[in-house]
Image: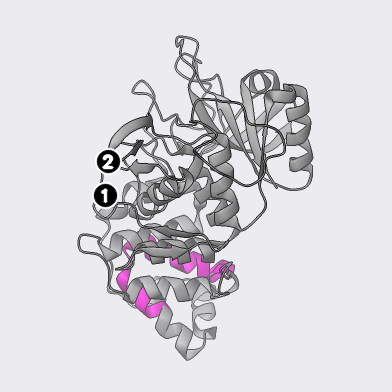
């Protein structure tokens, strides 16, 4: 994508042309599952039992410690969510995030935004239990977030980071996208609109919350181009010009707006060793670092760009979160034919590869 088309926050080094980061699981690999909760979100009807009937004594004590107004909010959310959402709601109450997490723009609590979603008017075709349940589950466990069958690795990584860092802000954005108007002001002040074709299930394998979030941020990230969620491609005036995915500097634009932080793009233009030093410095400062890589396997000739979120470097291995979510069982060592050789570490999308393999594929990163 030409640099002259997209604008982003200032970059630390010049951005060379590269294929958009858009890799999604090939047909030969397992489809991203996210988690059991995610797989069953649309099939778990709400239970009408009283909230405390599903709680352990310590959880019930936290419920009764809520103010009268907060208990009413909790009860409304409980009554509108599916069973997976109800379970996750209790966990958010138990660990304190339901009240302690506050959004990045208005300072409202996570519970307040969930209550809004439980009560507000929704666009026709959007099932409340689905979008509310999936939002609660993913706010409670961001490891369930997945890009599904769309080339949205970049914005899915941003979604994971936001849900991890500020569940309340994540809930605010999704709740506004699910409103009748579909208009959202992001933490940075940038405005986005719900993307077309995201109200109904799109057979992408994503939850309702992720479908709304990811497609709308693709539309924001691509600047003056238009994004088609149905076709997973960018275009001008209805004509497709670029397949799904976003280049590095557009990814930085999304991160800066969503997290309200000054992210910059760094590339291999000045060498991989320098880029690795930049990565290690960001990790040492406690940052999770979105990294663009060449993701092609040994049997493929064409470069395949993909973004992962690097978490740490330890014992000559790089650990990262793959936005494909859960694919293979933990402990699986992939053969490297259709994607890089790597080891599956858990069911939340965390994987690792050798440091030498990682360095050979490293292309760019975004950091504060």
**Nearer-the-camera pick, 158 or 250:** 250
Label 2: how many Cα within 10 Å (few below 14, some 14–19, many 20+)? some
Report if residue 279 lies within the magenta region: no
Residue 116 visible here = yes
The range drawn in magenta is 74-97
Q: Do the residues labelled 1 and 2 touch (CB within 8 Å)?
A: yes
- Mark 2 or mark 1, which is nearer the start of the sequence? 1
- Residue 268 shows which numbered tag? none
Q: How many labels does the image show?
A: 2
Based on the displayed image, in which of its 4 quarters is residue 147 positioned?
top left
Local secondary structure at mark 2: loop
Question: x, y (%) of residue 120?
Answer: 32, 75
Q: Give the residue number, with chain letter if any, for mark 1.
A: 197
Question: How far apart are the two marked residues, 1 and 2, measured between alpha carbons?
Answer: 7 Å
Kindly identify which residue carries mark 2: 230
Residue 140 image position (x, y, % from top left):
50, 59
Is 174 or 339 nearer to us in this picture? 174
Residue lying furthest bottom: 68
């Amino acid at each position: 994508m030409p640099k002259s088309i997209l604008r982003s926050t200032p970059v630390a080094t010049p951005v060379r042309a590269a294929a958009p980061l858009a890799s999604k699981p090939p047909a030969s690999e397992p489809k991203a599952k996210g988690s059991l909760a995610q797989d069953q979100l649309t099939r778990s009807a709400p239970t009408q039992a009283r909230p405390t009937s599903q709680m352990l004594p310590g959880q019930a004590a936290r419920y009764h410690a809520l103010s009268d107004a907060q208990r009413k909010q909790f009860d409304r959310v409980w009554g509108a969510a599916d069973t997976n959402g109800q379970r996750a709601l209790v966990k958010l109450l138990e660990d304190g995030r339901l009240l302690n997490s506050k959004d990045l723009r208005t300072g409202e609590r996570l519970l307040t935004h969930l209550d809004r979603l439980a009560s507000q008017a929704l666009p026709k075709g959007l099932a409340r239990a689905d979008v509310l349940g999936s939002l609660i589950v993913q706010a409670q466990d961001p490891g369930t977030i997945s890009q599904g069958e769309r080339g949205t690795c970049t914005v899915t990584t941003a979604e994971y980071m936001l849900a991890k860092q500020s569940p309340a802000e994540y809930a605010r954005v999704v709740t506004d996208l699910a409103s009748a108007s579909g208009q959202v002001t992001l933490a940075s002040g940038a405005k986005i609109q719900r993307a077309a074709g995201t109200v109904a299930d799109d057979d992408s394998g994503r939850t309702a919350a992720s479908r709304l979030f990811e497609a709308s941020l693709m539309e924001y990230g691509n600047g003056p181009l238009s994004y088609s969620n149905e076709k997973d491609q960018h275009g001008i005036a209805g004509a497709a010009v670029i397949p799904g995915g976003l280049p590095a500097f557009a990814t930085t634009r999304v991160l800066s707006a969503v997290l309200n932080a000054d992210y910059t793009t760094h590339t291999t233009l000045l060498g991989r060793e320098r880029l690795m030093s930049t990565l290690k410095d960001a990790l040492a400062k406690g940052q999770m670092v979105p990294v663009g890589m060449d993701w092609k396997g040994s049997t493929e000739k064409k470069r395949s760009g993909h973004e992962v979120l690097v978490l740490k470097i330890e014992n000559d291995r790089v650990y990262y979160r793959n936005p494909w979510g859960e694919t293979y069982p933990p402990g699986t060592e992939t053969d490297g034919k259709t994607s890089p050789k790597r080891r599956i570490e858990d069911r939340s999308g965390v994987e690792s590869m050798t440091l030498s393999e990682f360095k050979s594929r490293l292309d760019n990163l975004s950091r504060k």
